[in-house]
Amino acid sequence: MNIDSNAVAPELTEWFQSVQRMTDAGFFNIAPEGRHRDVVVLDTLRRQAKVIYNARLDADGKLYSPLCLFLAAACRHLRATLGVAHWRAALDNLCDLQQQLATYRPQSAAIGLDFGTPATLFKGEFDEAIRQAGLVDDASFLSKEDRQVAIGLSINWGMRLLLAYALETPRPDRPSERKDLTWLAQKLSSPAVGCS
């Protein structure tokens, strides 16, 4: 995979800001601002975490909406903003991981080890972060503060999972007119960009 993270990160930032605006206006807005909305956000965070945790990586793009809703809810819950630097770091991490896996795949196969794909590796880390945060089964040995850190880590892994998932999900050959999973994949696999 070749990605110019400096070129793509601003577009991802703008796209995610629109995801957050739509989620706030059309989803979280069912309750007035304040404690009731905080509950809606937390319920959404838990519900989407469980959907993703219990799902397998599919070829149909079914995890796109749950991942977007999770990221929007987690950012709102933590009052965090994902900027260009966050998306650039996620892109660089994905690019590096793909290169490492490609380099070591022949050697690992020679000794019978299968490390999986970037999406499977990121999903494993994401699943563990949401489990530690107590979002999956309400059980966590972490303090409230440490659970907040785990939610922050789940945002980190969720961003990377979403990007890797977009690349690994088969997509139509025609360009997408919507900024959806296909659009993400096209941004990440454009022949005009290269790893920087």
Image (cartoon, rainbow, N blue to C red):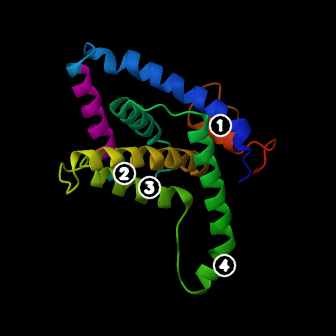
Q: Nearer the viewer, mark 1 or mark 4?
A: 1
For residue 48: magenta? yes
Which of the marked residues, 3 or 1, is nearer the chain's N terminus?
Answer: 1
Q: CB atoms at circles 3 and 2 under 8 Å apart?
A: no
Query: Pointer 3: residues within 10 angstroms few (<14), some, or many (20+)?
Result: many
Real-space Cα separation, disc 3 to disc 2, in angstroms: 10 Å
For residue 91: magenta? no
Q: Nearer the viewer, mark 3 or mark 2?
A: 3
- The answer to which image quadrant residue 112 occupies is bottom right
Residue 109 rendering spot, x and y as whole percentages? 60, 80
Q: Nearer the viewer, mark 1 or mark 2?
A: 1
Mark 1 lies on residue: 9
Residue 68 rendering spot, x and y as whole percentages? 45, 35
Q: Residue 123 shows which numbered tag? A: 3
Residue 164 rendering spot, x and y as whole percentages? 56, 50
Real-space Cα separation, disc 4 to disc 2, in angstroms: 29 Å
In the rendered structure, which segment of residues is drawn in magenta? 37-50
Q: Amino acid at mark 3?
A: Lys
- Give me the residue at 69% from left, 72% from top: 103
Q: Amino acid at mark 1?
A: Ala
Label 2: state its secondary structure: loop
Label 3: state its secondary structure: helix
Horizontal relation, residue 6 to residue 76: left or right: right
Which of the marked residues, 3 or 2, is nearer the chain's N terminus?
Answer: 2
Q: Residue 106 shows which numbered tag? A: 4
Res 173 visible: no
Q: Residue 55 shows which numbered tag? A: 2
Residue 22 rendering spot, x and y as whole percentages? 45, 19
